[in-house]
Image: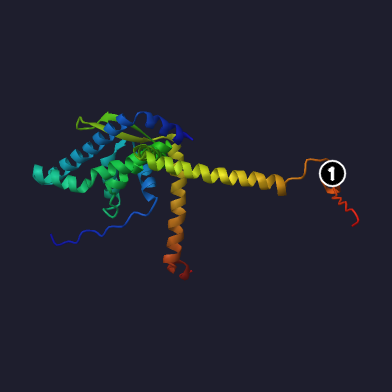
Amino acid sequence: MISLFRKLSWWSERRRKEDELREELQFHLEEEAEQRQAEGLTKDQARWAACRDLGNVLLIQESTRAVWTWTFLEQLVQDLRYAVRTMINNRAFTALAALSLALGIGANTAIFSFLDSLLLRFLPVSDPASLVVLNWHAKA
Amino acid sequence: MNHKPPSRVELLQGTLDVLILRTVLAGPTHGHAIAKHIQRTSEDLLQVETGSLYPALHRLEAHGWIAASWELSDKGKRAKYYRLTSLGRRQLASEQSKWQAFSRAMGLILNPADQEGQ
């Protein structure tokens, strides 16, 4: 529950969180470089060693960012936006797809409501079971 | 150098969280110092990958077990310091007892000599 509120507030200040994470990793890098320099490496060597130790910064940012929010929701929104864009760019296809869906759903609905009233529902009288069919024949 | 580097032990899934919580128990610490502390205290057996350290720190913060604040490091640079919250203290206690029970159980099975002697 706490986690939910915290994530919501983090989501509203994503930009600042991004900058902070960059600064945090930068600090890590500098700290590591200084430590390696103190161990006897030259400045450049120390810096490279620290970079190697830190690894792929973008990947770290990515996986840390994934903690802040709901990756699932973000990706869902991305997918939806992509879908809308594609449909707007491809109107004929969209219209055709919508038309075939409309026809399919419409035909099914029509047939079902027909069969429904014919076969599934009781007749609209008070005691349908007591109905009988009477046939009259004139003698030949 | 002809001494062999100490062989590293892979961190088990879910152990990093409790290691971090235990490390920040001592007082506010920044990410780099947390990684170094775990490495040093485990006699270099445990190597904390930066790629899992920072996501873990932010996850713990999201849980409310640790809180972060920007402060000046001892060298006068701005750094993000993490400290244990009271919620985190409770979490640490429960994790700790879980791990102690687990490692005792593993020890009992892997070193049955203790029982055979009796």
The answer to which image quadrant residue A7 occupies is top left
The answer to which image quadrant residue B10 occupies is bottom left
Mark 1 highlights which residue? A127
Q: Position of residue B50 (x, y in %)?
A: 27, 46
Q: Nearer the viewer, residue A52 or B115?
A: A52
Q: Position of residue B22 (x, y in %)?
A: 37, 43
- Looking at the image, residue B79 lies above or below residue A36: above
User: Amino acid under label 1?
Assistant: Asp
Identify the residue at image location x=25%, y=42%. A58
Identify the residue at image location x=44%, y=36%. A3
Q: Quadrant of the C terminus of chain A?
A: bottom right
Q: Position of residue B62 (x, y in %)?
A: 40, 37
Identify the residue at image location x=49%, y=44%. A101
Q: Is residue B98 left or right of residue A27?
A: right
Q: Nearer the viewer, residue A102 or A85?
A: A102
Chain of the residue under label 1? A
Q: Extreme right residue here?
A: A139
User: Can residue A111 be seen here?
Assistant: yes
Disc 1 residue crowd, few under 14, some 14–19, many 20+, Cα 10 Å: few
Q: Is residue A43 left or right of residue B21?
A: left
